[in-house]
Image (tube, helix red, strand yellow):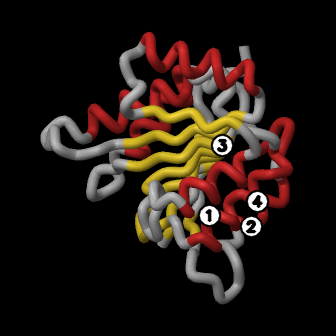
Amino acid sequence: MMTFKNAKIEASRQQIAKIQPSPKTLIEFGGYVGASAIAWGAILRGLNTADSAVDVNVYTFELSPVNAGIARNLIRLAGLESTVHVLEGPAADSLRILFKEGKLNKGGVDVAFFDHWEQFYLPDLQLCEDLGLFRKGSKVIADNTDFPGAPAYLEYVKSGGRQGGSYRYETESIKTASDRGPVSYPVCT
């Protein structure tokens, strides 16, 4: 299955745990059958256990109705249906809807995870920027940047982002022992 494997989840958890204050909102581009969304939900809940009143949310975007249905069922089985929300349809459209409805606000996204079609990594990242979703310290995680590859995205974040833009990125790539290909971790500065 094409899922974000355990070694990458653990490396990402370590990066997410560095965010202060503890992250409460994560958006995922490419939900597939919900495996990584379940992991994100558990990670966010775990990082926010000291404050039970904290509302944590994972919004995962999945184009396929079949995969979205499977994801919802697995999320329900995991007991995370109040934390992990599956939006069906194109990711950019889903993101705009969440913003319009006020579920995502300016500076309100702590983590964005890109694991959908690589040619959409950069336009979707720039949509997040245009909506003002990130704050200083937000992390952007991207899988499959070298294979099959997202060269425009990599060039963009490695160069720091848009010239004169509101967001600047510092990037680190981490290769895990058991998974093929590094994961990119840009941080908004």
Give how far across and how far down residue 50 sits, in percent.
13, 40
Q: In the figure, residue 122 lies in which quadrant?
A: bottom right
Q: Nearer the viewer, mark 2 or mark 3?
A: 3
Question: Which residue lies under the disc numbered 3?
Answer: 29
Report, in whole angstroms, how far the alpha carbon at label 1 lies from the one at label 4: 10 Å
Labels 1 and 4 touching (C-beta < 8 A): no
Report, in whole angstroms, how far the alpha carbon at label 2 lies from the one at label 3: 18 Å
Question: Which residue lies under the disc numbered 4?
Answer: 122
Give how far across and how far down residue 189 sits, in percent.
48, 72
Q: Earlier in the sequence, mark 2 or mark 3?
A: 3
Question: Is residue 8 shown left or right of residue 136?
Answer: right
Q: Label 2 crowding class (10 Å Cα cut-off): few <14, some 14-19, many 20+?
A: some
Can residue 154 be seen from the camera position used here? no
Q: Nearer the viewer, mark 4 or mark 3?
A: 3
The residue sitting at the front extreme is 101
Q: Nearer the viewer, mark 2 or mark 1?
A: 1
Which quadrant holds the N terminus? top right
Which amino acid type corresponds to the residue marked 4 in the rendered image?
Leu
Q: Considering depth in this image, is 65 or 176 the residue closer to the camera?
A: 65
Give how far across and how far down residue 6 sits, in percent.
53, 20
Q: Earlier in the sequence, mark 3 or mark 1?
A: 3
Which amino acid type corresponds to the residue marked 3 in the rendered image?
Phe
Labels 2 and 4 touching (C-beta < 8 A): yes
Labels 2 and 1 touching (C-beta < 8 A): no
Residue occupying the point 61% across, 55% down: 97
Q: Nearer the viewer, mark 2 or mark 4?
A: 4
Of the numbered discs in the image, which one, if any, rests on residue 128?
Answer: 1
Where 134 falls versus 32 (above or below)?
below
